[in-house]
């Protein structure tokens, strides 16, 4: 995913505000502090945060826990929801001891994983899924952006914050916000609030959608289409669909990546709407890699035996990505979002989830 530049904190900023700004940087918010999780004056806190010498190297207890969780995420027993839950648990208790590194790795790891999933796709089936999802995509993006403007005004939110949250909900979460933010010339605080809102709701969606899909007896195709439209980030779309079934995964990945291409026209439209000049629009080039992998798997017989291996590796990469994302959602993220932006994000998410589900069920 494209990522915003680390914010520069003015000298007058308070320590809490400085930490909050840095924690949201790069689309994977949540630089944990010692104030998060365990109380700083407890023996347990000191045990997990104090360095211990192991094999001549200084390590902390929370680093060991992080590594153990990471190793588990590399095994076949881990799943995307479990990985996200482990990351969230770590963020809310011990904190992420490698926040800087995981922030830098998350976007690239997700992109490479998505490309790897392309080796499990068939171009003919993907084209059919893309055509089916086109009408839903156009209608949901237009509806979400329009409703976001109206609800944002009603809540008294700044126009830029409302537009960023709307774009993140309408297209592809953090990627859309990271692409549209520079076009808007959004402030660091505005980017932070928008990213925090969609990341929190994104995590909820990953846990909530598969049980709802099973309860409603959705087909693989229906669930994959619903995920692609109603869940923010590609990571959670693929994670939820993978938990539902392989066919749902194929539909969800194809439709979601086709949806992500709308970053380009929406960014251009944003520049016109907000009267911005001399801005550059970021193109999600990893989608080209996904399409290339899919074409190779469909039309080059020599590549097809490698497909299952590459897809398995890609799924592991996705699981690790979600662990990193969860580990970034510290208590600071939850506190920094604020009530009104969260209300806007929740209202838009419920609208697009309900409307798209009813439309999919009606179409059959």
Image: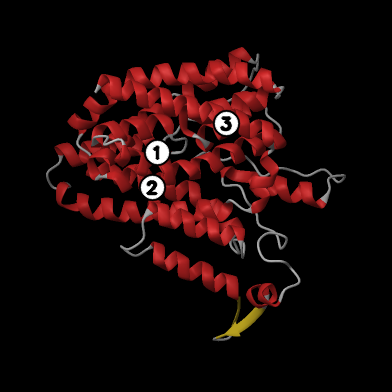
Which is closer to the viewer, label 3 or label 1? 3
Q: Residue 3: which quarter of the image?
A: top right
Residue located 25% across and 28% down the image: 129
Which residue is denoted by mark 1 in the rendering?
286
Q: Secondary structure at mark 1?
A: helix
Q: Residue 34: which quarter of the image?
A: bottom right
CB under 8 Å between callouts 1 and 2?
Answer: yes
Residue farthest to the front? 215
Q: Is residue 281 visible?
A: no
Residue 345 tag number: 3
First in sequence: mark 1 or mark 2? 2
Which residue is denoted by mark 2 in the rendering?
112
Answer left or right for 193 relative to 87: right
Q: Secondary structure at mark 2?
A: helix
First in sequence: mark 3 or mark 2? 2
- How would you rate the neighbour count of disc 2 (Cα within 10 Å): few for under 14, some for 14-19, many for 20 or more? some
Residue 93 in the image, given as x and y percentages of width and height: 61, 63
């Amino acid at each position: 995913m494209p990522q915003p530049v680390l914010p520069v904190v003015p000298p007058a900023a308070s320590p809490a505000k400085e930490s909050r700004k840095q924690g949201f940087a790069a689309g994977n918010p949540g630089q944990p502090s010692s104030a998060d999780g365990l109380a700083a004056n407890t023996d347990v806190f000191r045990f997990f945060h104090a360095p211990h010498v192991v094999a001549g190297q200084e390590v902390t207890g929370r680093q060991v826990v992080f590594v153990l969780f990471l190793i588990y995420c590399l095994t076949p027993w881990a799943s995307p929801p479990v990985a996200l839950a482990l990351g969230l648990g770590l963020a809310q208790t011990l904190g992420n001891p490698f926040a800087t590194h995981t922030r830098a790795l998350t976007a690239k790891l997700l992109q490479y994983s998505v490309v790897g999933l392309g080796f499990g796709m068939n171009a003919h089936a993907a084209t059919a899924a893309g055509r089916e999802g086109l009408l839903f995509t156009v209608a949901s993006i237009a509806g979400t952006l329009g409703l976001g403007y109206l609800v944002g005004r009603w809540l008294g939110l700044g126009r830029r914050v409302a537009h960023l949250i709307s774009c993140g909900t309408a297209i592809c979460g953090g990627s859309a916000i990271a692409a549209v933010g520079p076009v808007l010339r959004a402030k660091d605080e505005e980017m932070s609030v928008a990213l925090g809102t969609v990341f929190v709701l994104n995590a909820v969606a990953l846990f909530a959608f598969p049980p709802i899909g099973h309860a409603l007896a959705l087909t693989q195709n229906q669930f994959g289409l619903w995920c692609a439209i109603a869940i923010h980030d590609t990571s959670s779309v693929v994670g939820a669909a993978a938990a539902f079934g392989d066919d749902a995964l194929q539909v969800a990945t194809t439709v979601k990546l086709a949806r992500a291409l709308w970053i380009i026209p929406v960014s251009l439209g944003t520049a016109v709407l907000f009267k911005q000049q001399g801005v550059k629009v970021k193109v999600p080039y990893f989608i080209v890699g996904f399409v290339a992998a899919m074409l190779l798997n469909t039309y080059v017989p020599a590549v097809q035996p490698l497909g299952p291996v590459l897809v398995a590796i890609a799924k592991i990469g996705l699981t690790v990505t979600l662990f990193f994302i969860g580990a970034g959602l510290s208590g600071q993220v939850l506190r920094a979002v604020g009530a009104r932006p969260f209300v806007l994000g929740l209202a838009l998410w419920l609208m697009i989830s309900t409307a798209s589900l009813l439309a999919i069920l009606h179409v059959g």
